[in-house]
Structures are given as C-alpha cells and as structure tokens.
Amino acid sequence: MYIIVCGAGKVGWNLARELIDKGEEVTLIEGDRRRYLVVEQELEHAVQYGDATELWVLERAGIQRADLVIAVTGDDEDNILISQVAKEKYLVERIVARVNNPRNVDHFKLLGIHPVVSATDLILRLIEHEVPQYGLVHLLDLAEERLEIIELIVADDAVTAGKRINEVPLPDGSLIISILRGGEGFVPKSDTVIESGDEVLVVLDPGLEEEITRQFASQGAATGG
C-alpha cells in the first residue's frame, strides 16, 4: 500500500516507522520545520515538510494514488480538514483520523470520517476492562455495519449464571460469541453452562445493550436495588 501519514508527532513518527518496517511505502508530512528536520534525520526521503491541510502539499506527497491517509496531527480541526479533503476531493477509500478531544468524535462521525481513534476513549476502555465493577465494555463499534461487540462480566446472582447458552433469553439481533474463563477463551456451544465470573463477548445490533446487560448484571443492580 501507499500510505500518507499527516503529523510527525510521537504517534505519526512511530506509526510511519512501523509501517516502513512492515514494507509499506510511506510519506510522512510535518508542518513544523524544526520537527521535520529532526524526523528527517531518521526517515530521510520518507518525510516531507509542509502543511497537510494545503492541497499542493498533499498533491506533492502523491495523495492521488494513496491507498490510505492517516491524519494524526495534534489539532482536531486539521485532522477533520485533511480527512475531508482526502475523502471528498481525492476519493481516498481508507482514512483513519486521530481525535485529540473525545468530545469531537461526533463531529468526525457527522462528516462521515471513520474510523476515528481517541486515545482517551481507548484508555477508558482499558480501565473498564481491568475494573470489573464497570460491568460492560464496548470492545468494537462498527457504525457502518450497524454492529457492536461488548464484553460483560457475569455477576454471582445474574439470571444467566448456571444456565446453558440455549436457555439465555437474548433478544433478536444478538449472539454470544466467546467466553473467557480462568484466563482462557473459548467459543461456547449451545449446551455450555455460563458461570458467575465469566467474561462474555456478545455481538449485537446497536441499542440492545441495556436489555442484554440485565441478563448478566447483579439482580440488585438490574432492579435498581
């Protein structure tokens, strides 16, 4: 693939380096002259100096033939503009954008820019994963495909604890795809018994989270008691 990375901060620089090591053709664009000179000492011809929000800079980098554009500058407005230009003017099919302020995620989505990566959201998901009382973790949101994957921890008094998979009254549009038990994951069968403490992965249509959570949460929490 030919990949253009916009922004040579720590994220962009490391990303470009890893992609080059994997054999990809990469151009890294950086608008700060001093930063560019530092990065250029390592990446040489793979980095170009210029403002990636300028059309001529993108064209000089060869955006017309880019398979993927990655906008990871420290400015959300720049990332939005770069992504929009790549998508609308140059018809780049694959775009990945960094969101520095998670409050701006909706702005990216409204403009049809996806996937977007928010370090804050990723860290929050890791916290949710490591702290069981958070209950539900969103592992993956596929907005275009209208699918989500969530992880739930089975409470001791959950209605599903001790039941077989085929006895769990999940709503249409949802499916248990994996169970993590004792540090090991497996794909359950219809007669697999769900145990308290299991970490259950469910793929579902958006909007079903609350109904599904009730099946695995503590009955006290589910009833508000």
Image (cartoon, rainbow, N blue to C red):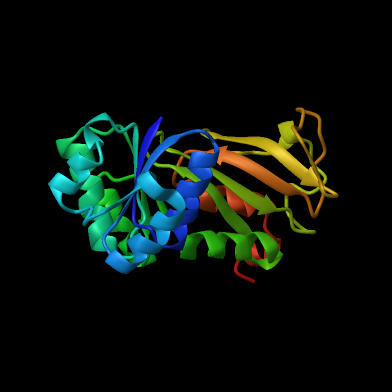
Q: Is residue 174 left or right of residue 44?
A: right
Q: Is residue 61 left or right of residue 152?
A: left
Task: Give me the residue at 70% from left, 61% from top.
Answer: 218
Query: How many numbered marks appear?
Result: 0
Q: Is residue 53 left or right of residue 151?
A: left
- Assign the N terminus to one quadrant of the image: top left
Task: Give me the residue at 34% from left, 57% from top.
Answer: 7
Q: Is residue 123 visible?
A: yes
Task: List the single residue furthest toward the bottom.
Answer: 225
Q: Is residue 118 visible?
A: no
Task: List the single residue furthest toward the right.
Answer: 182
Q: In the rendering, at what x and y percent does residue 142 appear?
A: 44, 40
User: Considering depth in this image, is 95 or 184 the residue closer to the camera?
Assistant: 95
Q: In the rendering, at what x and y percent does residue 61 appear?
A: 25, 41
User: Considering depth in this image, is 192 or 150 the residue closer to the camera?
Assistant: 150
User: Considering depth in this image, is 91 or 34 the residue closer to the camera?
Assistant: 34
- Assign the C terminus to one quadrant of the image: bottom right
User: Considering depth in this image, is 154 or 25 the residue closer to the camera?
Assistant: 25
**Quarter of the rendering containing residue 46:** top left
Above/below status of 160 relative to 41: above
Above/below status of 42 relative to 100: above
Q: In the rendering, at what x and y percent does residue 144 appear?
A: 36, 36
Q: In the rendering, at what x and y percent does residue 194 appear?
A: 79, 43
Q: Is residue 203 left or right of residue 96?
A: right
**Quarter of the rendering containing residue 32:** bottom left
